[in-house]
Image (spheres, rainbow, N blue to C red):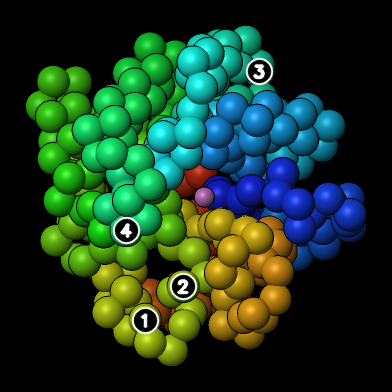
Amino acid sequence: MLIDTHSHLFDDRFKKDLPAVLERAVAAGLERVMCLGIDRESSRDSVAIANQYPLVVAAVGIQPNSVAEAKPGDWHEVVRLAETEPRVVAIGETGLDRYWDKTPFAQQLEFFDRHIELARRLNKPFVIHCREAEADVVDVLRRAFATHGPVRAVMHSFSGDLATALGCLEMGLFVSFAGMLTYPNAQSLRDVAKAVPLDRLLVETDCPYLAPQPVRGKRNEPAYVAHTATLLAQLKGVSVAEIENATTQNARTLLGLAGV
Ligand code: NI
């Protein structure tokens, strides 16, 4: 069993064959796939896909790079979906991004705070996108931690350093690894993954982007999360079944999947 905790199944690249993609996911042993919106339209689409396919659950949010293009009312639609749609299990993706620099940083911070508050109010976890903004993200999380205690969230497609990972673990977060972990030049990331305890690890594809090494260059899809799980098992020196059990249990706990 496996749970792909981060996918973008609404992407055009899945338009033609989503049912087949999800069949392959089930055949690969996946019990759930979370589909995350990056703006208003894709948040709606994520909910629609989750409502259509029992395998899929949704998260809604406005990703930092999409914040600049958000129109008045978009945030309210995200809030409405989060409040009213029973298959929305998390808020996001949200976070901070200094790499693309598409949205003024102050505006990214404002929206990051909004997502965190919405998650807290609705008692849902949130999903953090962090690109070249590790210190800023940890700063925001430390403030949340100081005020409200353990942070119910995941660092998605983690690509930061060990200090960042340890800081996040200290505050109660989960750390999720994507296909990048399998790339030959990602040794420092593999060293970080080794240090993340089994009870805080998650796996994801972030599909359709960044397929893992054996299928690199192809369109990524949820079934390929197995490659990342296999590599994690090697890194941690445990069986693949142990990684599957641990990451699946962690995802169930974080996302509150019982009964969804
Ligand atoms: Ni994503």
Q: Residues within 10 Å of mark 4 (few under 14, many from 20)?
A: few
Q: Amino acid at mark 4?
A: Tyr
Give the spatial CA distance, label 3 vs label 4.
Answer: 34 Å
Q: Amino acid at mark 3?
A: Pro
- The image's mark for residue 99 is 4
Q: Quadrant of the N terminus?
A: bottom right
Residue drawn at (24%, 39%) of the image: 105
User: Which residue position is annotated with label 2?
Assistant: 180
User: Can you tell which of label 3 and label 4 is closer to the viewer?
Assistant: 4
Q: Are marks 4 and 2 in contact (CB under 8 Å)?
A: no
Task: Give how far across and how far down residue 38 sits, in percent.
Answer: 54, 39
Of callouts 1 and 4, which one flags the residue occurring earlier in the amino acid sequence? 4
User: Which residue position is annotated with label 1?
Assistant: 186
User: Which residue position is annotated with label 3?
Assistant: 86
- Is residue 22 or residue 226 the one in the foreground? 22
Give the spatial CA distance, label 1 vs label 3.
Answer: 38 Å
Secondary element type, mark 3: loop
Give the spatial CA distance, label 4 vs label 2.
Answer: 17 Å
The image quarter containing residue 225 is bottom right
Residue drawn at (64%, 35%) of the image: 42
Q: Amino acid at mark 2?
A: Met
Secondary element type, mark 4: loop
Task: Residue 175: tell me if it is visible.
Answer: no
Of callouts 3 and 4, which one flags the residue occurring earlier in the amino acid sequence? 3
Of callouts 2 and 1, which one flags the residue occurring earlier in the amino acid sequence? 2
